Image (tube, helix red, strand yellow):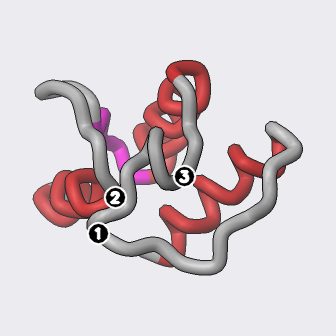
Amino acid sequence: MDKLLDIINEILETKGEEKIASLTDEMSLRDHIGLDSLDLAELTAVIEAEFGIDVFESGIVNTIGEVVTKLELTQ
């Protein structure tokens, strides 16, 4: 989950937002972290480049836990 935190913090930093210290499975990508549609597209692209998986391929992913589950399924 550390790499995912790094990716999200890079996106937040690009937006001029404060970085977050940690992630929990329950955190909403939109509501808790504040990612918008463009940010989610960037997140998808970076995760796909880094891990070789499109986390949104089979539908909407709303929480950190859902992203982590999809990443774990590829390992």
Question: What residue would you read off at disc 1?
Answer: 25
Badge 2 vs badge 3, beta-carbon distance below 8 Å? yes
Residue found at the very far front of the displayed protein: 31
Relative height, residue 73 to residue 21 (above, below): above
- Residues at marks 2 and 1, CA–CA distance in whole angstroms: 5 Å
Q: Is residue 75 visible?
A: no
Question: What residue would you read off at disc 2?
Answer: 64
Q: In the visual, does 71 lie left or right of 18?
A: left
Q: SS class of the residue under badge 1?
A: loop
Badge 2 vs badge 1, beta-carbon distance below 8 Å? yes
The span picked out in magenta is: 51-55
Disc 2 or disc 3, which is closer to the eye?
3
Residue at left offset 54%, top offset 78%: 22
Q: In the visual, does 44 lie left or right of 11?
A: left
Question: What residue would you read off at disc 3?
Answer: 33
Kindly identify which numbered label has been placed on residue 36: none
Tell which circle, 2 or 1, labels the residue nearer the N-terminal end. 1
Which amino acid type corresponds to the residue marked 3 in the rendered image? Ile
Query: To which quarter of the image does residue 54 belong?
Result: top left
